[in-house]
């Protein structure tokens, strides 16, 4: 039973990572972002970058690395999105799923909305997805 659940998770997580444009290792992402691996690891731990354990390694979805003024950087709104999923205890995989799948409140994927500069709309959609405003 445990092996079946693990196999199912591996299949689902691989599909999500593919929707995210693939992944980078901690080392690859640090090089691309022009920072040290420890600095990037600290940013992941703090929620400033979406990263999660896949297999036995930290993996960073490519979709969040964009060019800002011709320099690679993390897409605006990623840290706010990650924070909502971390705070609610839904977790990083749920954050990734939210970002790469179409959202009815946005009419497209949240990652596309973030790339369009719609951080507030994405945060509102994330809170709605997690039902955080229902009380």
Image (cartoon, rainbow, N blue to C red):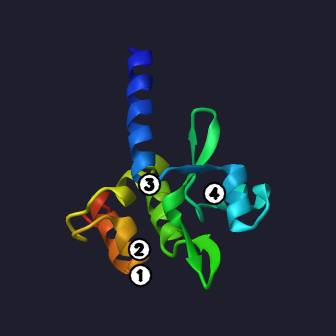
Please tell me which of labels 1 and 4 falls first in the chain. Answer: 4
Residue 57: x percent and y percent?
64, 39
Q: Secondary structure at mark 4?
A: helix
Q: Nearer the viewer, residue 10 or 127?
A: 10
Q: Which mark is residue 81?
A: none
Q: Nearer the viewer, residue 112 or 78?
A: 112
Q: Are marks 3 and 4 in contact (CB under 8 Å)?
A: no
Please tell me which of labels 3 and 4 falls first in the chain. Answer: 3
Q: Secondary structure at mark 1?
A: loop
Instruction: Using the numbered discs, state the Cα–Cα distance from disc 1 to disc 2 in whole angstroms.
Output: 5 Å
Residue lying farthest to the front in this orientation:
70
Residue lying farthest to the top in this orientation:
1
Q: Is residue 12 above or below residue 110?
A: above
Local crowd at mark 2 within 10 Å, few (<14), some, or many (≥20)? many
Quadrant of the rendered image containing residue 114: bottom left
- Reading the image, the residue beneath label 3 is 20
Residue displayed at 59% across by 47% down:
59
- Reading the image, the residue beneath label 4 is 44
């Amino acid at each position: 039973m445990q092996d079946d659940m693990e196999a199912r998770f591996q299949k689902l997580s691989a599909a999500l990572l593919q929707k995210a444009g693939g992944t980078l290792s901690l080392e690859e992402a640090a090089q691309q972002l022009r920072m040290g691996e420890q600095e990037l690891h600290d940013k992941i731990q703090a929620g400033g970058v979406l990263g999660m354990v896949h297999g036995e390694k930290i993996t960073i979805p490519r979709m969040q690395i964009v060019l800002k003024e011709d320099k690679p950087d993390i897409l605006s709104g990623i840290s706010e999105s990650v924070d909502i999923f971390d705070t609610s205890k839904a977790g990083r995989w749920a954050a990734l799923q939210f970002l790469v799948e179409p959202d009815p409140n946005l009419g497209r994927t949240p990652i596309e909305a973030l790339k369009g500069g719609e951080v507030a709309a994405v945060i509102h959609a994330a809170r709605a997805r997690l039902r955080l405003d229902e009380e």
